Image (cartoon, rainbow, N blue to C red):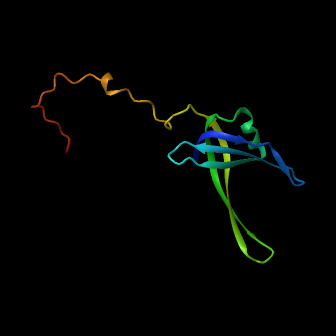
């Protein structure tokens, strides 16, 4: 899955526990009718992927959705979701995915030698 938008915030790398677990967060604001501020976390060696990016830059982030459960001291099971990034790349503002730009209609010449009597084999 992917999230595309503009970087709103890049956090510092945080280290947790005795095993040195590392996490770094980035917030990407989508560019749609109702923009969403999506928090994506990069973990372990992936935290370094954010070093070359700045706030305001348009990016496409490849993500995985993660889910886990936890039983609290009262014995109730709680569920948590996270969005984990594994790749980030810069995109140009206003880019529409991987579709190449299409030339305007004026760039195409009309067909001049069309013969209405020619039959084609198209079924429609």
Q: Is residue 16 above or below residue 112?
A: below
Q: Does residue 23 lie above or below 94 as drawn?
A: below
Number of marks present in the image shown: 0
Q: Is residue 123 above or below residue 99?
A: below
Percent across and percent down for residue 79 are 68, 67
Residue at 82% over, 47% down: 14
* Residue 97 x/y as whole percent: 50, 38
In front: 4, or 44?
4
Camera-nearest residue between 121 and 1 = 1
Image position of 91 (left or right of 82): left
Q: Residue at x 75, y 35 (%)?
A: 51
User: Does 13 sit above or below residue 108?
Assistant: below
Question: In the displayed image of the protein, which residue is found farthest to the front?
Answer: 34
Which residue is at the far bottom?
A: 75
Q: Check the picture and name the quadrant holding the C terminus.
A: top left
Say which quarter of the image contains residue 12: top right
Please give the name of the residue rendered at 31% of the width and 23% of the height, measured from the top-left corner. 106
Horizontal side of 25 relative to 63 (left or right) equals right
Left or right: 54, with 32 as reference point: right
- Residue lying at 16% horizontally and 22% vertically, measured from the top left: 113
Tell me residue 13's x, y (percent). Answer: 80, 44
Residue 8 at what x, y percent from top left?
A: 67, 41
Residue 110: image quadrant is: top left
Residue found at the far right of this picture: 18
């Amino acid at each position: 899955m992917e999230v595309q938008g503009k970087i709103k915030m890049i956090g510092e790398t945080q280290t947790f526990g005795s095993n040195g677990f590392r996490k770094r967060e980035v917030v990407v604001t989508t560019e749609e009718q109702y923009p969403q501020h999506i928090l994506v976390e990069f973990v372990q060696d992936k935290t370094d992927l954010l070093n070359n990016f700045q706030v305001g830059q348009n990016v496409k982030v490849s993500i995985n959705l993660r889910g886990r459960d936890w039983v609290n001291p009262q014995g109730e099971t709680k569920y948590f979701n996270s969005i984990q990034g594994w790749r980030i790349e810069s995109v140009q503002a206003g880019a529409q995915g991987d579709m190449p730009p299409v030339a305007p209609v004026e760039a195409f010449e009309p067909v001049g030698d069309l013969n209405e009597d020619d039959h084609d084999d198209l079924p429609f």
